[in-house]
Amino acid sequence: MATALQLTGIGKSFDGFQALTDADFDARWGEVHALLGENGAGKSSLMNIAAGLYAPEAGRMWVDDNPVQLGGPRDAARHRIGMVHQHFKLVKPFTVAENILLGHPLATGEGSHRKRLGTLEAQIRAKAGELGFDIDPRQRVAHLSIAEQQRVEILKVLLAGARILILDEPTAVLTDVEAERLLSTVQALARSGAAVVLVTHKMADVKTYADRVTVMRGGRTVKTVDPKQVAVAELVQLTVGDSVAVPQRRRDGVAAGAPRLTVRGLRSAAAGGRPALDGIDLQLKAGEIYGLAGVGGNGQGELAAALMGLDDTIEGDITLQDVGDLKRLSNAQRRSLQFAAIPADRYGLALAGALTVAENFGIGQVHAGRYGSPWRLDTRTLEADAQAAVEHFDVQGVRSLGQKAALLSGGNAQKLVLAREFGRAPRIVLAHSPSRGLDVRAGAQVHARLLAARDAGAAVLLISEDLDEVLALADRVGVMTRGRIVAEFDQPADRQAVGQAMTDHG
Amino acid sequence: MADASAAVPSINAAPVTSRRPLASRRFALELRQQMPWRRQALILGVSLIIGMGVSAAILVAAGVPANELLNEFVLQTLFDKQSIQAVLFQAAPMILVGIAASIAFRARFWNLGLEGQMIWGAIGATAISFFDVGPAALRLPLMLAMAMALGLLWAMAPTLLKLKLGVNEIISSLMLNYIASNFLLHLVYGAWKDPKDSFPYSPQFRAFERLPEWFGNVSTAAIGLALVVALLAWWFVGISRAGLYLRFVDANPRMADAVGVPVRRMIFSAVLLSGALSGIAGFVVVAGQEGRLTQAFYAGYGFSGILIAFLARNNPLAATVVAVLVAALFVAGRNLQVFYQIPFSMVQLIQAIVVICVASSDFFIRHRIRSVVSKT
């Protein structure tokens, strides 16, 4: 079988950090080739080199057995390589067709713009029909769901002529059903002769859909195997090196404590249309994890924002045990009541990427006077605390405390957030998709922290789109749909029933 | 997989055009994540030298003898006692507006109203003199306090408009400058006109209403005041807790709000402080330089303040150094004007060239240029 894409001996470093060392990879025509590894293993870096975004420092690349050197994504497109990035690169106010026109040969073709756009729209409809995508080329991208935006990205690279398709963590943002649909589609694409590279850290996707899998670890390619021939345990072993301790399942039979946070009739003030929060009733008890499952975009973000005190317009009651109305309190006051928050949008709400690790850590307790008076910031104590927390919470990749937080990988950034939020024993924890985008090891560490907080008597609200996560950790499970909590289950909950509730009211 | 390879020929059917890459295509740009500060300083220094070089070439083309350039520009300005005095004289208000701009920009507030706040500062100081408020010994502190108060109040308008109604401060603060300057004209052409000669300026301040000249004949008190303000500003942004809050407001306001930083209060106080500092700059000009309220004393300071803050990356101590350099450029330009009939706009041109060079250096600090050719 002919080799579609081959990379040998690839090396790449970023500011002294060796991201890739002597990495080898090849994908054949007609196969789905998975690239498996933890966060920071170098999967995305390697594929960004294949897509012409990064120039390698060492190594060679062949496309269809011809040596190539890429000067940018445009060169990659000429060699028929297309990549769908984890974070979509779409212009939201533009229509689907306009987005696809960028980078399409028709963009500079003959005839008027309108005429070319019309031709393209026909092409989009044809291609979308072929792939079973339901996409209206005239729809604005801002109005599309995440899954639909991803389809637009795939159409974009395919219509630009790509035959080597690289998908970077395509299922991270999708529900189970959507992920299955997507992966069968790309499998069909491969069967029709294309080469598909699937960058992922989900074992299940690899087992079901990949023809071959290359495992990466620490910037090197470890091994290429046939996933049908090896056990999941062996794949995990290859990805993480040594074994990972999976946190204890929830403890059964221990009664939760008194209700600590009570939410009644929480409603967002909508200016028209359906409000994002449509009467949420919720009770968090001390010493329990309440898991809130649901498909993304059903009001989870708004609920988290309301509880974090980021939305002043919210209606309804949020009552904190022994304190009363939480809405009256400033965010600084909430924090002084040991209210810990792990927002989903890590660099939007949890960290300031441009500031240092020490500053991002210290800001959590500076109000309380832990780090000097208002007149003088006690940087010595702050840095000592930060250093201790970085070690205690196993935040890796911190070369110095003065390093910008944006340079941490996803998992380590999340650990820094945990280090700050769990610095003092929290009484209430709000965790929104806390392990999203994290690898197995980092995810397990996050889960262990949540369980430890629960065992120490905190009331934990875990909002997650990952049903496995909710079922593994929660003591009680709620399902959120269209801004309401539509069902509640005691553990052990029936997975089928919960899944049914998630989709029923959607 | 025969069926798969059967579909492949479409690749060969449309052969990849092997265009010879242009020179520009052999390099790729990459975002750089972090750079040691020494390299940043080096890049900054090199760009400054390039800017100076271009400026020198322009001056030579305009008729300044090349061998005189160094003499005029550097030696005369930096080593002549009178020139140094002139530079310090010029530098004091520039330091103040530079710091005023830096502090507002640190709160992500584009305070383009520096001139208006300066005007109100000057009006406040002059009012104390004009209406003979307080005993002579307290006159200067009263003038200073009044200047700060009025500068602060003038900055409050765009701040409230922004925080309460979401009005863009770039427009509101800039437009308020015109109101301030026209009110100034109204005063100096009207009620406050000097009765002695009926020129459009206020009566001369009395000796105890002028900033003292401790050494030589330059207002050392003005430069001293500016340096004290610089130190206080450095404490504010670098050492106090508010400085940490401001860094978070600057870096990520939403996140800052979420972790309990009083974002709105920080913005409010930073901008009011900026207004008060501009007010002091106005006070320094009327009480230290002019000795009275004149009709156009503020011209150009708004632009200079923004420029200084930008070049100093909103750091108060760096702003002090930059302000002195800008003042030196000013004085050197004036010397050139006198001796070689170089128009003053040339000085502004040089300023602009230096700024553009320094601004472009940012590109090289943020990006890495990498050759596409890979080694095996």
Image (cartoon, coloured by chain):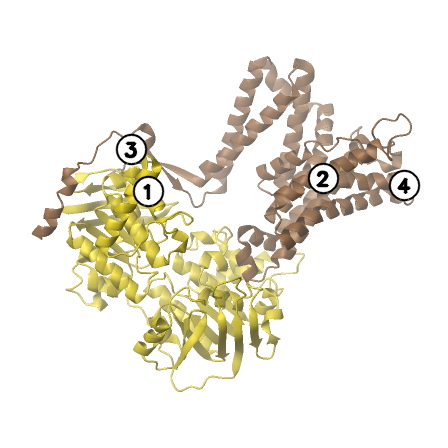
Chain colours: A yellow, B brown
Work out how far the residue at label 4 is from the one at label 1, CA to CA, in angstroms: 71 Å
Whole-number angstrom distance, CA of label 3 to CA of label 4: 77 Å
Do the residues marked 4 and 1 share a common chain?
A: no
Secondary structure of the residue carrying tag 4 is loop
Examine the rendered structure and indicate whether residue B253 appears above or below residue A231: above
Give the amino acid at mark 3: Glu
Residue at mark 2 to residue at mark 3: CA–CA distance: 55 Å
Looking at the image, tell me whether mark 3 or mark 1 is earlier in sequence order.
Answer: 1
Left or right of residue B168, residue A206 in this image: left
Q: Do the residues labelled 4 and 1 touch (CB within 8 Å)?
A: no
Q: Is residue B273 left or right of residue B210?
A: left
Answer yes or no: do the residues labelled 2 and 1 have beta carbons within 8 Å? no
Q: Residue at x 49, y 79 (%)?
A: A283
Report the residue marked by disc 4.
B131
Residue at horizontal 70 percent and vertical 33 percent from the top: B91
Q: How far apart are marks 2 and 1 (CA)?
A: 49 Å
- The residue lying at 71 percent from left, 24 percent from top is B83
Q: Name the residue tied to disc 2.
A: B116
Q: Which of marks 2 and 3 is in front?
A: 3
Amino acid on which disc 2 is placed:
Gly
Tags 4 and 2 touching, CB below 8 Å:
no
- Residue depth check, mark 3 versus mark 4: number of the one nearer the observer: 3
The lab-note entry on whether marks 3 and 1 share a chain reads yes
Residue A412 appears at what percent x and percent y?
A: 41, 59
What is the chain identity of the residue bearing mark 4? Answer: B
Q: Residue beneath label 1, please? A: A101
Q: Which label was assigned to residue A110?
A: 3
Tag 2 subunit:
B
Badge 4 local density, few (<14 within 10 Å), some, or many (20+)?
few
The location of residue A87, given as percent across then percent down, is 37, 53
